[in-house]
Amino acid sequence: MNDVKKTARTQARLPRGFGDRGPAEIAATERMLATIKESYQLYGFEAVETPFVEYTEALGKFLPDLDRPNEGVFSFQDDDEQWLSLRYDLTAPLARYVAENYDKLPKPYRSYRAGFVFRNEKPGPGRFRQFMQFDADTVGTSSVAADAELCMMAADTLERLGVKRGDYVIKVNNRKVLDGILEAIGLGGAENAGRRLTVLRAMDKYDKFGADGVRLLLGAGRKDESGDFTKGAGLQPAAIEVVLKILTEPTSEITSAMVEDRIGGVLIRNSAFADLSASQIFNEGIAELVKIQFLTRNSGYTDEQIRIDLSVVRGLEYYTGPVFEAELAFEIAEEDGRPVRFGSVGGGGRYDGLVGRFRGEDVPATGFSIGVSRLYAALKAIHSPVVAGAQQRGPVVVLVLDQAEVVRYQGFVSLLRNEGIAAELYLGSSGMNAQLKYADKRKAVCAVIQGSNEREKGEIAIRDLVLGAELAAGSKERADYLELRTKAQFTVPEADLLKAVKEVLLRHA
């Protein structure tokens, strides 16, 4: 009896909230990233790269709590007991980079970067723990022209990616406007910071829950379909109605009622927000919005592309001025046939205090971030040529029908590679049919075959795998069938290998 215990087989399973990507998706994503990069570079932004790992304290709102950081980031301690974390976004690492290299960088400093970020949060449908962002930031200027420029660049980028005008909009708001409203309902001051965030989070749920749902979240709280209860902000009914006006009042009417005949002056006339006319921070926010609108309109962008929308709320705590969101307006059908909107695929805003955490003084900055994975899914849904592109083809596969001739076969591979043609030598131990099936799985256009008969004659057989698949797909007229069969596999002298392979590749380019 064999007493040796079998080792338990390790289960192959993907961690929740993470995903694998195949070659087709990687290639399509790279084309998408290249298009975004071209758009950013056109605006004068330059590349920079920061590491995946930062000191936890550098991430800002996620700080070590006793012997471990708060939830939200993946963290660990290094050998000197310093807390390190996987980056939560690309903005906090940029703030650290700028602060560390402040004296060497040109100001304003314009940069872009792409990369994966990590969230230690509960995963769900469309909610991942690892995903890619593509950011652009301008650091070192307080001019709202920098914010307007990011909105214009966001519009340009979406159109370059194949999103038609009318299928997207860049919505712009200002945190000063929201702060003025919250101040007016008695939520000013540091002591109300927590309640202000609760109100902003409730406002941010307007698209999802509507006015009635937000009203509950602003009041006592809301219970969802599963029975889970979310505690509300506890506002009085009158205060709730003031907040809801921001979400429901037509923006065009609000702005037209607020604007005097000069950009720097703001006057609230017959508006639903006349009671806020005494708020300095509210008026500052409106004035900045008016200037952004003035700059974008005079640069040729319409209200269809970029528009003021006072319902936009960005959830991050560090926004201090204009905030913007790139929203897709088109609908697609889910598996059950229900229409669904993609919604936001990017956003950003002004964060004048983030770099200052490292320098002890405010450094003005503004940025825009694209959610690459979500935008990629949207571009696939509308069949954007940027992510569709040409079908991914595999390398030319050189079959090995005689192991004693491997050196000879390797010479064919080297000949093709030296001419810039992707090629590989079959390295398995299967027979000819299995090798051809392998080439099909590799999405190869053609295979190079030389058995003993061809070798004795100094010839090589070329198998066009694309035409071969067409032949196998169904019956055709005899004349067409014979023509296809002739093209699907033919023999040439060894000296014509390169020419023959190029002809087949060109046939399916």
Image (cartoon, rainbow, N blue to C red):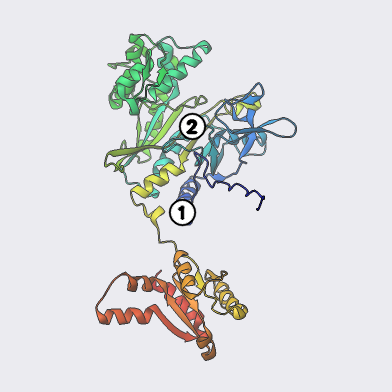
Of the two numbered discs 2 and 1 on the same chain, state the one appearing first in sequence.
1
Mark 2 or mark 1, whichever is nearer to me = 2
Callout 2–callout 1 Cβ contact below 8 Å: no
Q: Is residue 36 above or below residue 93?
A: below
| Crowding near the residue tagged with mark 1, few <14, some 14–19, many ≥20 C-alpha atoms within 10 Å | some
Q: Is 184 on the left or on the right of 402, as rendered? A: left
Alpha carbon separation for disc pair 2 and 1: 30 Å
Tag 2's secondary structure?
loop
Q: Is 107 on the left or on the right of 167, as rendered? A: right
The numbered disc on residue 210 is: none
Q: Is residue 62 above or below residue 37?
A: above
Image spot of residue 153 (x, y percent): 43, 42
Image spot of residue 257 (x, y percent): 30, 21
Task: Please name the amino acid that badge 2 sits on.
Answer: Lys
Residues 265 and 393: in front is 393
- The quarter in which the C terminus is drawn is bottom left
Image spot of residue 238 (x, y percent): 33, 9
Quarter residue 85 falls in? top right
Residue at image coords 45%, 36%: 127
Q: Which residue is mark 2?
A: 122
Tag 1's secondary structure?
helix
Residue at image coords 37%, 49%: 380
Of all residues shown, which one is farthest toward the bottom? 457
Image spot of residue 366 (x, y percent): 51, 33
Q: Is residue 172 visible?
A: yes
Q: Is residue 475 above or below residue 312?
A: below
Quarter residue 229 falls in? top left
Q: Is residue 187 above or below residue 45?
A: above
Q: Which residue is mark 1?
A: 31
Q: Is 202 on the left or on the right of 304, as rendered? A: right
Q: Is 8 on the left or on the right of 434, as rendered? A: right
